[in-house]
Image: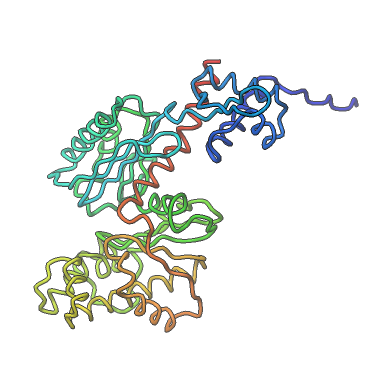
Amino acid sequence: MGGRRPLRGNPQLLRTMNERLLLAHFLEHGPSSRVELAKVTGLSKPTVSSALAGLEAAGLVELVGSLSGRPGPTTAIYDMNARAGLVAGVDIGRDWIRLAIADLRGEFIGRADVHNSARSSADLVRRVHTLAHEVAASAGVDWSTMSYAVIGSPGVLDPATGRLSLAPNLPGWGRAGLVDELHAALGVRAAIENDINLAAVGELAFGAGRGVRNFVLVSIGTGVGMGIVINGELYVGGSGAAGEVGFLPSADGDVTEPDSRQHGMTESVASAGGVARAARRAGLTARSAKEVFASAAAGEPKAREIVLAEGRRIGALIAAVTAILDPELVVLAGGVGRNLDMFDEAITRRIAELSPLRPRIVASELGDSGVLQGAVARALDTARDLVFDRRTQAG
């Protein structure tokens, strides 16, 4: 039996690999000369020149300057053309719709945040469509030029049925045909992902999770949810529902709220709505969780008790999550969760009562922008490949 013939290099494959290597360097380090590129990549200067020529012809790299004033010829400086592709991130929530357009470096070139006053799911889809075109126009671009868009939405998308489930805070959001209508309204290549998962991706890429391999983001606001990052990658579980911690039993033995079957026991008592209901039961005039926290900050005793009770619930939730996932870090997000300074001690005490494990707990660094930043980060992962693939196919 004869020996295997040695593999020979495929010129097109090698050229593609070299071009991707240069683009990756530009993306991470910015403008560089041919000499610098050859040094850091290990490629020969002729190979670097050839790859640059191909990328420049495709509009993916451009000459951005030159260095002179030293012996020898002028040194040309190149960088990636960040406008060779554009992406969009969309954050659809009960109270707000946020939309941003970014270039291939992830720099926002347009953004708008508007109150969600839609009266139906169809109305909400129309508002997203309108906002997309308004943001694009304000940025001086055509919405149809988006390479890719990622939509952050409450709930879990079932790929088999094409429907969103577990999104009770957006009435009608789980109806048949809604996802198709949303895709049609945007009219560009797009994906829909869970908003809390995207918030975790945002913290991983731009916030408190940078450089952390294992962490969770616990969001407590209109709803209660969790995004999980394991070994630097988002974990969504077998059906995409990993992190739906709102359905955990309430560890402090709270009375079950009327809507706990639909929303989950923990979400019913620990969400912003649960805080507001606790305030009403205590005889407070505060109508929202935000007002309860403001009253507590002003020293109102009953409001302070409600806030401390909320801290204990969050502490119990973190203790349960830590026993299963053992994260290095817990990032608290959401309109309620980001008030860490007000119930940090209550959380710490409750965890100490329940568990010997002590994860580091911090507030989100991205605030209201977490989902949007995560959506843009996910869109970039796809768009950069799409833009390069179009260049390869054209070649």
Quarter occupied by residue 258:
bottom left
Residue farthest right in this picture = 1
Residue at point 28%, 79% (across, down): 308
Residue at point 36%, 39% (across, down): 108
Q: How many marks?
A: 0
Q: Of 338 and 28, which appears nearest the observer?
A: 28
Q: Position of residue 127 (x, y in %)?
A: 19, 37
Q: Of 292 and 38, which appears nearest the observer?
A: 38
Q: In screen coordinates, is 272 left or right of 150?
A: left
Q: Of 122 and 49, which appears nearest the observer?
A: 49
Pick the quarter of the image with the N terminus.
top right
Q: Position of residue 182 (x, y in %)?
A: 27, 35
Q: Position of residue 186 (x, y in %)?
A: 28, 31
Q: In screen coordinates, is 362 left or right of 388?
A: left
Q: In screen coordinates, is 173 left or right of 50?
A: left
Pick the quarter of the image with the C terminus.
top right
| Picture layout, residue 394 above or below residue 381 | above
| Picture layout, residue 153 above or below residue 49 | below
Residue at point 48%, 71% (across, down): 359
Quarter occupied by residue 144:
top left
Q: Position of residue 283 (x, y in %)?
A: 10, 78
| Picture layout, residue 339 above or below residue 300 | above
**What sort of colour scheme is used for the picture?**
rainbow
